[in-house]
Image (cartoon, rainbow, N blue to C red):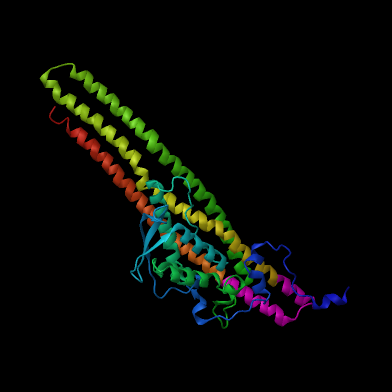
Amino acid sequence: GGGAKSSATVSRNLNRFSTFVKSGGEAFVLGEASGFVKDGDKLCVVLGGRGPEWQGDPYPFQCSIEDPTKQTKFKGMKSYIAYKLVPSHTGQQVHRRYKHFDWLYGRLAEKFPVISVPHLPEKQATGRFEEDFISKRRKGLAWWMDHMCSHPVLAQCDAFQHFLTCPSTDEKAWKQGKRKAERDEMVGANFFLAISVPTGPGTTLDLQEVESQVDGFKAFTKKMDESTLQLNHTANEFARKQVTGFKKEYQKVGHSFKCLSLAFELDQQAFSAGLNQAIAFTADAYDTIGELFAEQPRQDLDPVMDLLALYQGHLANFPDIIHVQKGALTKVKESKRHVEEGKMEVQKAEGIQERCNIISFATLAEINHFHKIRVRDFKSQMQHFLQQQILFFQKVTQKLEEALHKYDNV
């Protein structure tokens, strides 16, 4: 069987269900992807100060998500929630339902193998129209939207732009854009064809270095995943204690002061009245402080948990992205070995290495983007958290000071 081996190509990955295969990464690295890339579809990776980066969006925009409204169709037989979106680059509002977000997410997750498409807040079927759930989901969607608009590749992609700009009333245009997105050829293996990376001397990435960077990132995401779970659990517990425990305890103290002031009132001396009122006021202050504790988590802990939920989605995406990168590196190592053994032409091996270089550039650009956004988000969320905590304790102090002054003229 020795003769048959001479035309050996790089072995196919036997696990047809592996992400490397499903994402189209394998077909691309082996040079089997062929598609025509229009200029508008090109995705550029550039060398920035911290290594490879996605080329910035020349026209950055934001999109607000306003409080949702309940709408009906079939003459009121069926009701649903629609969110009002206002993209800053058009200024035109459109209404979208959760199922539209869901459709878009599905398209993008399939189209972009090495980009972390933010997960949507979960779809909750029970009690869909409860105020709390709706406002919580809106906050989750606002974070989702921010991450979409902040990503240079996702923000400019056709399906997302269609979602943001197609008038809600034009059913026909919506369906056309939807079909166009579903027929998009630049998905999977072809997505990699659209990536253009820096060329010229010194722009080939060192495979060993890429591997150690990706391994470092893998360890980082594992640790971040564990610590966000832990923080989420702790914040949840803390919020629960404030809403039930702390509130009850403070109100118990208030109640005891109240009982004392009622006891004192049995002594009907005029000179004692001021004291009784002051103690009764102190009792009310503790009651109010109990209420403040119960309301507080909405201001500071909940927003932190919303952010953690979004990041848990990103962290769940990265193992697959890393797997695509690893698969590409493995093919390069295999091809080098085949060349040494005389089983493969140098030219073919160089092609594999070049295409792996493209995947590496894209992966490192994505990792860089993740870190940049992470620092931005956690900075602003921690600032918000501490500002709210400070305001809270100022309110508590103010209540106690008011109570203290009631004793001035006793």
Determine which quarter of the picture holds residue 247: top left
**Position of residue 205 measured from the top left corner of the image (x, y, whole percent):** 59, 74
- The magenta region covers 333-361
Q: Is residue 168 above or below residue 133?
A: below
Report the quarter where the C terminus lies: top left
Specify whether residue 40 is in view: yes
Pinpoint residue 4: horizontal percent, then vertical percent.
Answer: 85, 76
- Name the residue: 67% across, 72% down: 27
Query: Where does the image place residue 30, in percent across and percent down from the top left?
Result: 68, 74
Q: Quadrant of the N terminus?
A: bottom right
Residue at horizontal 32 percent and vertical 50 percent from the top:
387
Q: Nearer the viewer, residue 226 or 92?
A: 92
Q: Is residue 112 visible?
A: no
- In the image, taking residue 91 as reference, residue 321 lies left or right, namely right
- Residue at 39% over, 33% down: 245
Please tell me whether residue 362 belongs to the stretch shown in magenta: no
Residue 356 covered by magenta stretch: yes
